[in-house]
Structures are given as structure tokens and as C-alpha cells.
Image (cartoon, rainbow, N blue to C red):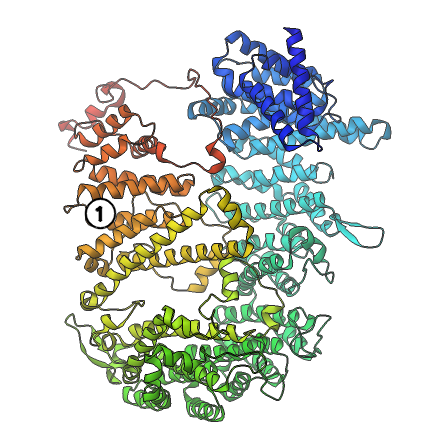
Amino acid sequence: MADQVAAMCDQLIKALNVMMDAETGQVYRLEALKFCEEFKETSSFCVPCALQLADKAQPAVVRHFGLQILEHVIKFRWNNMPQQEKVQLKECAMHLLTTGTHSILEEESHIKDGLSRITVEMIKREWPQHWPDMLKEMEALTSNGEAQTELVMLILLRLAEDVITFQTLPTQRRRDIQQTLTQNMESIFSFMMAILHLNVEEYRKLKGSPEHELQARAHCRVAVATLNTLAGYIDWVSLVYITSGNCHLLEMLCLLLSEPELQLEAAECLLIAISRKGKLEDRKPFMLLFDDVAIDYMLSAAQSADGLAICMKSNEAVDVVERRYIFLKRLCQVLCALGGQLCSLVGSDVEVEVPANLSKYMEALLAFTTHSSQFLKKTTLPTWGSLFRHEALCKDAVVVQMAAKFLRTSMTNLVKAGFPSRDDNPSCQYSCVDFDSDEDFNFFFNSYRAQLGLVVRFACRIVPLEAFQIAAEWLQYQISSPIDTGAITSKTAEGLCSFLSPSVVQWDAMTVFMECMATQIFKNLEEEKLPIDQSMELLQAVLNYDTKDPLILSCVLTNVSALFPFVIHRPNFLPQVLYKLFKAVTFEVGQENKAPRSRAVKNVRRHACSSIIKICRDYPRVLLPCFDMFYNHVKKLCSSQATLSQMESSLMESLVLISNEFKDFEKQKAFIDELMASVVADWTSEEMRHVLSDPAVYLSFVGADQVVTEQNKDADTSGLNRARLSFCLYAMMGVVKRARWPADLEEAKAGGFVGGLTPTGAPIYRNPCTAQFLAFLPNLLALIRTQNSLFTPENMARLSETFSRAHDVMDAEKNVVLGLSQNLLDLYDTAVYKSNLERMQGFLSTLYDNCFHVLGSAGVSLQQDFYTIERLSEEIAGSAFLSLDHEYYNSLLCPLLGPLFAYMQQRLNVKWQLISQRTSVNGEDEEVVVCQESHVTQEMLEEQLVRLLTREVLDLLSVSCISKKGHEPAADKEEIDEEDMMMDSAQTASPAQPTEELSELGKHLFKHENIYMNMLTLTFTSLSWKDTTNCHRTASMVCWTLLRQVIGGNLLPEAVTWFYTSVLRALQVHGQHEVCNSTLSQLAMLIYENLRARYPELRVVMTQIPNISVEALDQYDHRLLDPNAQKVGDKKRKDHFRKLIEGTVGKALCQQFRKEVHIRNLPSLYKSPKPDKDVVQNSEATGLEALFAPEKNTL
């Protein structure tokens, strides 16, 4: 036999060498691999060959393969091995641990890993029942040297990971091992602490001595392994073991922060420990970390942070040392976790005082906030936010003082700097480690600055006047500083800044700070304390500041808006503010009107319009005295422009907002009639009616049938025509969206806005823009019909060669859909449209969107005047309805939504079937397709668009039918957003049973059988479409809410069967995802339990599930159908049902061909017998019978 084993080992070694040789051909490599795999599966010589191959005299690759064979044997043959062979294999494994390795510094890490794996696999199958002395044997093994001690630590760590973290065992085995570990945890922890203490002491003693360098490194390696193992246990053991001995473990970890070779592992242990949740009383000992020793070690490590992760190269360049930088990240997280414990404990029921060393702690945190790494800065923000919002801590003198320091620090941190491609800031070196590209950094920084802005707001609440002073000084400094364009200037105009120019990034940062300060100062200071005079000086300086740089001017406009609330107290400044904004509305870089304008110029104009609208929306009463001046300016502007645009329509929108303050229906109606007279006259003209109702004339009117080259550009007439259409729609949209009656009912009555009462007594309001809109509507509907007909073959054929792709998705929108980022400089420096085709695409899509925005706004604004229009439902192709009275549901919405849902279900189902066919494996054809990169991109785009459309349709269905019970709308949106932003993540679990109910519209829709069956078909079909987000949302919120409305009726058995199989089919597609698995299983159980009694066909479906236990199904049915059967708890019932249907659950591709590992349960150690005594009969012990006896009525 020995000869056979030796011969087989030689063959295996040859096969391994063939596989590992880079020169080997593919055919030979596959043959060698097949030989090795077949040997593992079938050979009876596996154990002796594996032991011979694993001998330490062999090369590392051969040894590793030997250990792999042993692991395979234990995983897949253990259950069938005789007991004697198991014992023998266990002894051989222990022998390998004892003598089968090289010294700790020489041995390969993958060999150590392989040895630990086979030991843990045996432990998982035999401990504690059949191997009770395992822990003692491991402890004894450590006496053999550092290599064995490290192996023991690796074994304990892997055991904890498999049992607790990954839970790769059957429930009973996992419970047995976990309970045994818990029972022995005191000795395990003592053992690990002793090993750590011993090796750290030895390492410190020997590390400075050259002759003992190897021994010192060996002790260091053991200490690292022990710390890693501790990290695997600290996460889940009782807090008692972590905080025992006056937090001895945590103190020791703090001391190790000063050891360069151990500090990273120590910091990771410390982070896991301090991040623990649990009872506040149990966490109270963590406050010991604020004592002098621990906090001093953290403070010294934090304050030396800037130099720690940087090393100088020979050419004076700097480089980031990755291990040290990771340590800095962990130490920063430790401080943040400690801050989290502080905020939880101070001011709570456990009565923890504010620590005396709070200032030291905050200095350490500030050291990371001022560090060059943007990642470290962001890590500290949630902690600062918690401290500044804490009810007790925010009043502490140390925190108040630190809030002012934090605001000063934010002046630097708000500046966008540190792009990995550049070298103009100390942050750049760290960004090279943290980010793959400038786009990645830009995405990160935008998120970081939004979060920083929130924390700045919190700090401003604490020290509002100091915040104002900082903002004022910074703004004055920027105004007085000359513009520095830097090395990278604008591409579109000479001498202008790019968004990377030093002046722009400074102005940008200051502007964010100013906005944060301004939003808080009015909320947190009484009116008499507001710095009105100083703010007016500041505003005057901003208004006097003149620049032709669009990027800086945009920042100036934001500062004007931020300071505007102060103008309420000094109304004489109002005309100057309006003049500044009006001037920016027509901003041009040069003297002449040059087209095409850059995005930066267009952004300034839009910014100015948005600022005016915002001011008019928020302070209409303040602006009312300036109404005539405002109106005259708009008239003058409109008369001087050859073509009117979105800018002029925005100013008209602003005027309507102010006119709402007239609170006089006739006066406001007369104003709107005058304002819109020319617009409506143009829109309703015979020429326009002809254009808007005939697709061929329409295409000619907008120039889509003309051939245009870049030399002759677009025909002037066509450009003017497009501008006419756009302006008319923008103007009407602004008026319809903004014209309103007074919110106060008495004021509305006095102003003539109430036209009557509904049968329920609610007022019927009149909108002053109704007459103008009703005149506008016929041609608007004609335009929608024309636009929908543009996709027919004959109209597509009318498009010229230039505009043949006019209906394609624009490149910028494609990038958004596909998640591709745009070049950062192009966001500001390029023209808005790069070509005539893009201009036409933008016009057609925007015009189409605006048609529906007008219709949607009309429903909200006009209400009865809109919904009582004759034949409205027949005229509208589709729209969003937000405020329709119930009396119009049947007459208007049911005829619209029924056919819409039926059509979308059919259309989307075809699209998803195509996607499924495309993604299924179809051999050579797929290879041909994949070769065409553009084709693949187009397929990805189409699939993503279908996915987005599916979610939109199901959102519409959900909004139409379901009335959600839950949170009331937030009174202060900003506060809610702040809370949301400060949370790292929020996971919401699905409710045990959906609580949604039908809305009023939903009840009307469910009166029509064809409509509700279309909706049910759409929702249940969509579960199997390859979109997990949609599946989860629809299964958890929509399906059962709709289905339970009809289960009391006479549903056909075929329909019930189809609904149920649709859910099971969805489990086949999405069951690999735990979230979908949970919601779909819940939905399947709801259907089965509610319909099983009436539809025995459901049992027939269940019996077709692969590998279902008929006995278990009978038991479930018996409990469900028999009223006298013993009932079980919800959790057991759900677990039972999930086991029944687990045969339908699809597996991920990586799991489908994996060989199953079966671990047998051992006799349970901890099963406690149920008490068989009746507590009522045992009256002597309980006194229950005596307590409830009739004679005790005196109670």
C-alpha cells in the first residue's frame, strides 16, 4: 500500500506542476485539474496521500494541495467514516499542528490557513459532544512554540467566524457550539489575554536588540494573531468580558496604539469594542476611556496623524504609507465611536457626568477634522453633529467653545481641493489612495460637503453671532481679493475662471458657509439681537461688487439670496437687490449676444430667475410695494427682446406670485389677463392651431424636416418658431402653477375667490387664471396628440437627415441612466447643446414634458373648473392627478387609468420577455452580440429604461390605489432632511402584514372588474421581472392590498392558482436575495392561508414544488383548516411555511453548481425538558387558586 500511495503522490505532484506552470497549454492544464478533482472525489488513498503531500519537506504548493484533500475528506466523507478513522484523522491533524510546520516567520500564510481550516471543520462536526477536551488540547498546543500559538489563534478565529458571523452550520450544531463557547468564554478570554500580554511584553523587551530581532518578530506575529482573534470575539461576547477588571482589555489596547507594529490591529479591536450596543448600564464602563491614560494615548496618536502616514521619497515627493493610513482611519473611527457612547450615556437614565477630559477628547477629534485626508474629515462629521445636537452637551462650555473652532476649521474644509489627478494640495496624496478618478472624488466631495453643511448649521445654532462674524469676514475678504484664474482657465472665454480656479473654489466654499449661517441665525436669535446694520453693510458690499466671471457671479447671487431675509428690516434696500438680480437675468460675458452660450452663462441667468422666484414666493408681502416697478421692468424687457425665453417667463411667474397678495379676485384676474394677453393670442391664433394639429406642418414649423449643416447653422425662422412655442408653454405653466387664492377662508371670501359650496359644505374656489387656461387648453391637447403621432413611420420619414435621430435619448441623459459621469470641466465650460441635433432633441423632449406639467398644475390650481371640462377624459392621453374631487373619479379617471394599466402591462411584459431572452445563455449567438460594444451599451440603456418605466408605472398604480398609513408630513422639511443626512444608513424592515388600505380612487377603480383584474395582472406579473427593487416594493406594499379586496368575491380557481404561482415564480427568480425572499414568502403565506379553505387547487400547486414534504404539508394544512388543531406561534408558522416552499427558491449562479456540505446534528446538550406540572393544580406553590377564590372578593 505504501508503494501505491507513493506512486499516486508522484502523479499528483506532476499534475500540480502542470497546472501551476505558466507555459502549460489549456488542454493539459484541464486534464491535470480533472485528474486531481477525480482523485479527491473517488480515491480511497485520499488521507494517506494527503498526509504525505502535506509533509513540511514538500514545496508549499504541494503541501497546500495535501491540506485541501484533507479538508475535502472531512467536509464530504466524514459522515460515512468509521469512528476509528475519524479518531485517526483527528490525531494526524493534531500532529500536523504540532510538528508539521516551519517556524512562524518562515511558514506560508496559506499553509497556516489550510491547517486551521481542517481543524475547524472537525470541531464543527464533533465538538463539544465527541471532543470535550478540544479547548484544553488547543491550550496545550501553545506550549510548543510561537508557530503553534498562532495556529491556535487562527483556529479560534475561524471557528467564531463560521459559527457566529457567517453561520455556515445547521441551527442545532450552531446553537450547541455557540452555547459551549459562551459557557467557556471566561477561560477563553483569560487564555487570549494571557497570550497577548506575554507576547507583547516579550516583544517590547527584545525589539531593540539586533541579535534578538527574529525572536521579537515572532512574538509580534503572535500578538497580531491574538489581536485579530480577539476582534472576532469582541463583536458578540457579553460586554462583561470586555469591561471586566476596570476595562483592563480596553486599557491594554489603548497602550498598544503607540506600538507601530501592533497599533492597527489594536485600533480595530478597540473600534469593535467601543461600537458595541446594548443596555446603557452595561456600557457605562466605556466612560473610563475618557480618563487620562487612555485619552492621552489617543490624543498623542491623533495629533501626530499628519506626519504618520506620509513618507518622503528621495526626490522630495511624498507618498502615503498604506498601513499607517489605515491605522489613522481606524483611530478616527475609534474616537467617533467613543463620541457615540458619550452622547448615548450623558443625559440618560444611568446618570453619567460630562467627563473632565472632554476638551482633550474634542481636541483629538479636531485633529482629524483638520487632517489633510478628506476621508478622515468626513468620518468625524456624524460625531460632531451628535455633539452639537445633544440636549445636554451642546450647552457645555467646552462644546460651545469647540463649535466656534469647528466653524473656523470648516472654512478650510468646505474648499473643494484634493483631486487625485492634481498636486496642488496636501489632500491630493491621500485622494490618490482613496479615489480611482477625479469623478469619484467629485461625487464623494459633494456628499461630504452636504453633510458638512448640516453640521455647520448645528454649530451655528450654538454660536450664531460668532458664525455671522466668520461669514462676514470671509465674504469681505473674497470681495476685496483679486480674481485668481489659476492654471486651468475657461475654454469658452479668455481670462475667465474654470470651476477649479482658486478664486472659484474659495467663493464657492464661502457661499456654502453663508447659506448655512443665514438659515440658522433667524431661527436661533431674537429679532433685537440680529446684526441688522452689519448685515446691511455686507449686503451693500455684495450689491456693489461687479464681475463678468459667470462662476463667481453665481456665488454672488447666492449670497444676495442668503442675506435677503435681513432686507425685511431695511426695505429701502429692496430696489437695489432687484436691480442686481434683473441685471443678472440678461447676463452676457461680452458686450455682444454670442451664441451658443456656455453652461456657466446659462446657469447665471437661471440662477437669477430662481432667486427672484424664491424671494417672491417667500416674501410676497415685502415685494408688493415694488410691484409696479417690477411689472414695468418685465414689460420693458419683453419689448426689447426679439425672442422671449424661459427667463422672461420666470419673471412673469414671479409677478403672479406677488399678485397673490392682492387678495382681490377681479384685480388679480385683470392683471393676469393683461400679462397673458399676447401669449394666449399667439397660442390661439389660426396659424398656431394649424401648426399644432398637423404633424407634417409642425415638423416643418420647428425645422425638423430641414437639412442643416454646422456651417449654415439652423434656419433663423425655425429657431424663432421653437422659441415661440417654448415661451408660450413656460409662461402658461408659470401662471397656472403660481396663481392662487388666499389660504385664509375669510380673506378668500372677502376677495371674491369663493364661487360656492360643495354638497359637503367645502368651499369651491375660483382661480383668476382659469379663463386664460381654458382658452389655452384646446391647442395644448392638439399639441400633445401631434407629439404622440410623431413616432409613426410616415412622420419619422419626414425627419431630415440632420434630425433623423431627433427622438433618440440625448447623450447626457444616456449617461445619467447608465450611471456614467461627465467630465467635470464640461459641466461648466461647454455649450448647452453641442450640435443642431442635440438642440432639436432638447427642444422636443422639454416641450413634451412641459405639456404635461401644465396639465398637472391645472388639476391642482383650477380644481373644479378643470375637472368639469366637457369630455376631458377622452381628450387627455395621460397625466398625474393630485387633487381631484371624489365626484369625478368615475367620470374621469376610471376611463383613463383602466386602459392605461392594461396597455402598460402588455407593453412591459413584452419588453421584459425580450430582456429575459437576451440575458439567457444562448451559445455562439451571444458571443457575436457581445463583440459589438455599442450594441451592448444600447441594450444596457434599453434595459435600464424599461426598469425605470416599470417603477414609474407601478408607482402610479400604488399612488392611485393605496392610501398609506404612517408618518404625517414633516412640518419642517429641513429638520427631517438633516436627521436623514446624519444617519449613516437606515434599514426598514417589512411589516409582518401589510397595513396599507385602498384610497378613495382605489375604491372606485375596484368597482370595475376589468380595471381591477388588469391591475392585479400587472402587479403579480411584475414580480417575476428581473428588477429586485420593484419586486420587493410591489410584493410588500401592493399585491396583497389589492388582492384582499377581491378574495371575498367569486374569483375563478384558475385566477387564484395563477396569482399563487406568480408569487412562487417570483421566488424562483428573486429568492436568492434575502429581502425579496422574505417579502415573497410572506405574500405567498398570506394568499395560501386566506384562500386555501375555499380553493383546494392551492394544495395541488404546493405538491408540485420540488422536494416538498407531503407530511409537513399535511401537518400545516391540518393546523390551518382544523379549528380544534393546536395553534403555533407566528414565527414557527412562518418558518414551517418557508420550509415547505424552499424548493421554489432560486439560487444565485455561484451557488447552483456548488457541492452541498452536510453536517449532522449531535445529541443536543442543552435541551431543557418541558415542565409537565399544571401550575393551577400546584396551588401550594403558586397560591393562584386561593387568589381567585370567590371568598376573596375583598380584594
Which amino acid type corresponds to the residue marked 1 in the rendered image?
A: Arg
Q: Position of residue 947 (x, y in %)?
A: 41, 55
Q: Position of residue 602 (x, y in %)?
A: 54, 78
Q: Position of residue 526 (x, y in %)?
A: 48, 72
The residue sitting at 57% across, 21% down in the picture is 71
**Residue highlighted by disc 1:** 1044
Indicate the secondary structure of the residue bearing disc 1: loop
The residue sitting at 21% across, 40% down in the picture is 1090
Q: Is residue 994 left or right of residue 552?
A: left
Q: Is residue 1179 left or right of residue 608?
A: left
- Quarter holding the C terminus is top left
- Quarter holding the N terminus is top right
* 514 versus 23 height, above or below: below
Viewer-proximal residue among 529 and 222: 222
* 397 versus 736 height, above or below: above
Viewer-proximal residue among 161 and 893: 893
Viewer-proximal residue among 884 and 455: 884
In this orientation, does residue 1172 appear?
yes
The residue sitting at 18% across, 41% down in the picture is 1053
In this orientation, does residue 620 appear?
no
Report the number of discs: 1
| Classed neighbour count for the residue bearing mark 1: other residues with Cα under 10 Å, few (<14), some (14–19), many (≥20) | some
Please identify the quarter of the rendering in which residue 635 is found: bottom left
* 974 versus 947 height, above or below: below
Q: Is residue 644 left or right of residue 439?
A: left
Q: Position of residue 350 (x, y in %)?
A: 48, 43
